[in-house]
């Protein structure tokens, strides 16, 4: 396994751990939201955080199977996930409110990350088996 593949695997696993911790805090901790809207924000943040953490793990596995590494898709997913879920977590757990455009910018970067990964899969040749 290459160092860059390992990097994305470890980062995805660390992100998954933080997603589980934040979801547990939001469900059982003293910061658990009481309003239905904040609970919806937490559910959305948790879903996207967990899903895209798994995507980073998958990206690390995929990266080990191609000839020329391409890190743009994972970088877009990471930044998008951070902005999208981070802004929602801040709304749920603090009184800090980011500018309203942060969340949709994060969502747009997530879409670009998936699109970039799609093109990378279509354009990159796998390493031959055996």
Image (cartoon, rainbow, N blue to C red):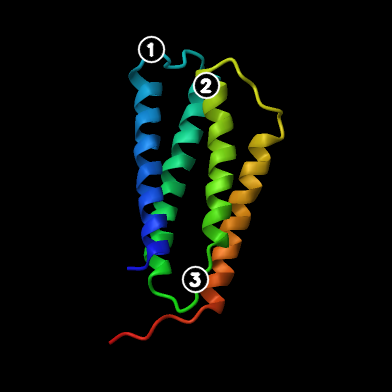
Q: Earlier in the sequence, mark 3 or mark 2?
A: 3
Q: Secondary structure at mark 2?
A: helix
What percent of the width, then of the height, locates residue 112? 63, 56
Using the rendered view, name the quadrant where residue 117 is placed.
bottom right
Q: For the residues marked 3 and 2, what is the alpha-carbon distance in whole angstroms?
A: 37 Å
Q: Nearer the viewer, residue 130 or 39?
A: 130
Q: Nearer the viewer, mark 3 or mark 2?
A: 3
Which residue is depicted at the point 31% across and 85% down? 129
Q: Secondary structure at mark 3?
A: loop
Q: Earlier in the sequence, mark 1 or mark 3?
A: 1
Which residue is depicted at the point 48% across and 23% down? 39
Q: For the residues marked 2 and 1, what is the alpha-carbon distance in whole angstroms?
A: 12 Å
Q: Nearer the viewer, residue 84 or 38?
A: 84
Q: Nearer the viewer, residue 88 or 65?
A: 65
Above or below for 37 versus 46:
above
Q: Secondary structure at mark 1?
A: loop
Which residue is depicted at the point 71% across and 28% down? 99
- Specify the farthest residue to the front: 3
Q: For the residues marked 1 and 3, what is the alpha-carbon distance in whole angstroms?
A: 43 Å
Quarter of the image for the N terminus: give it: bottom left
Badge 1 density bin: few <14, some 14–19, many ≥20, Cα 10 Å: few
Disc 1: which residue: 30
Please give the count of numbered marks on the rendered protein.
3
Disc 2: which residue: 92
Q: Is residue 118 left or right of residue 34?
A: right
Which residue is depicted at the point 36% across and 59% down? 6
What percent of the width, then of the height, locates residue 110? 58, 50
Q: Nearer the viewer, mark 1 or mark 3?
A: 3
CB contact under 8 Å: marks 1 and 3: no
Q: Which mark is residue 69?
A: 3
């Amino acid at each position: 396994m290459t160092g860059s593949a390992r990097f994305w695997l470890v980062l995805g696993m660390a992100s998954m751990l933080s997603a589980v911790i934040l979801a547990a805090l939001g469900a059982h901790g003293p910061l658990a939201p009481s309003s239905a809207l904040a609970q919806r924000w937490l559910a959305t943040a948790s879903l996207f955080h967990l899903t895209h953490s798994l995507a980073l793990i998958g990206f690390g596995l995929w990266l080990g199977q191609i000839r020329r590494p391409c890190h743009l898709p994972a970088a877009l997913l990471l930044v998008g996930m951070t902005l999208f879920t981070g802004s929602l977590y801040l709304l749920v757990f603090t009184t800090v409110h980011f500018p309203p455009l942060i969340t949709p910018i994060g969502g747009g970067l997530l879409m670009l990350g998936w699109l970039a990964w799609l093109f990378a899969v279509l354009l990159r040749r796998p390493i031959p088996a055996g």
